[in-house]
Image: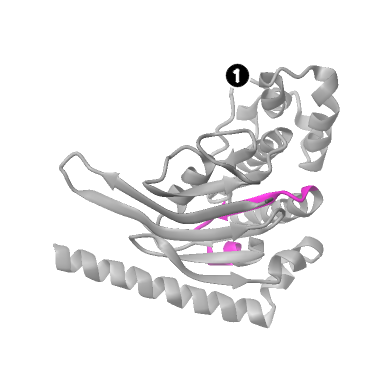
Amino acid sequence: MTGLVIENLSMRFDLPNGTSVQALQDVSLELAQGELLSVLGPSGCGKTTLLNIVAGFLAPTEGRITLNGHRVTGPDAERGMVFQQGALFEWMNVRENVSFGPRMRGLREKDYGANVDHLLNVVGLRDFMEKSVYELSGGMQQRVALARCLANDPDVILMDEPLGALDALTREKMQSLVLKLWKETGKTIILITHSVEEALLLGERLLVMAPRPGRIHREYRLPFADMGVSADLRQVKKHSEFAARREEILGMIWDMEEEIMGRTEVAS
């Protein structure tokens, strides 16, 4: 079976004082190859925990994840990660960063070089390949991180708030780039974000997570990611359904945050 399957996933963190935190509870999801999923919810709803389990960085307390029919038990090149900060190697130039994965797999320049140069061209960094990463802007560093991830040819790309630290204009350009790469590569993408607008723009499917214990509160199937591949994102945001969904989800998350605040006040 192709695709990502999450079955009855739960995650509990046991604390030194003898108490525990139930971060996720009974999360199930199937994601077909080539789908783009955005995930949002209030702080503490387990979004990043879920992503780290899919990446193989954490082992769940219960449940399992399978990708293309085999069980996920740890990190693997089939799942690539793009973090909020690029996590690039500052002692390497741009091209060396992008080619790091293939080189670590023992490939030779003649095997990976053309693809690395192609990816640098796709993300608009062909003229910066010899630059050190500290010479680049935040947006350019995130483009390097995307290209480095793609150079490993993963089946699934996991993105944890990858655009959160960027200014508004750069963020919009990067959103367009993510949609372009999604369509051109056919990769499965899971993107975590705190921005309702970004989740709507980039989510072919969108999950709203409920607060602790984290669980799927509601799922949407949306047209905006496909629209954004060929249209200006600012025009997509003017769509009447976009505005309606934005207000609906904002209200939903606002109510969750109010509930969390109420619990905190009662506990104190």
Q: Residue at x 56, y 75 (%)?
A: 246
Q: Residue at x 66, y 37 (%)?
A: 149
Residue beneath label 1, please? 91
Is residue 165 visible to the viewer in this orientation of the structure?
no
> Which amino acid lies under the numbered mark 1 shown in the image of this protein?
Trp
Q: What is the crowding at mark 1: few (fewer than 14 residues within 10 Å), some, or many (at least 20)?
A: few
Q: How many marks?
A: 1
Q: Residue at x 78, y 35 (%)?
A: 120
Side of 227 relative to 79 (left or right): right
Q: Is residue 247 above or below residue 37?
A: below
Q: Is residue 174 above or below residue 214?
A: above
Q: Is residue 265 above or below residue 166?
A: below
Quadrant location of residue 98?
Answer: top right
Determine if the magenta segment contains residue 188.
yes
Quadrant (top left/top right/bottom left/bottom right) for the C terminus: bottom left
Give the magenta-colored segment's residue range.
185-199
Is residue 63 visible to the viewer in this orientation of the structure?
yes
Side of 163 relative to 28 (left or right): right
Q: Nearer the viewer, residue 217 or 244?
A: 217
Side of 56 relative to 229 (left or right): left
Q: Nearer the viewer, residue 127 or 218?
A: 218
Q: Position of residue 138 (x, y in %)?
A: 60, 40
Side of 152 relative to 115 (left or right): left
Q: Position of residue 85 (x, y in %)?
A: 53, 39
Q: Nearer the viewer, residue 44 or 106?
A: 106
- Disc 1, SS: loop
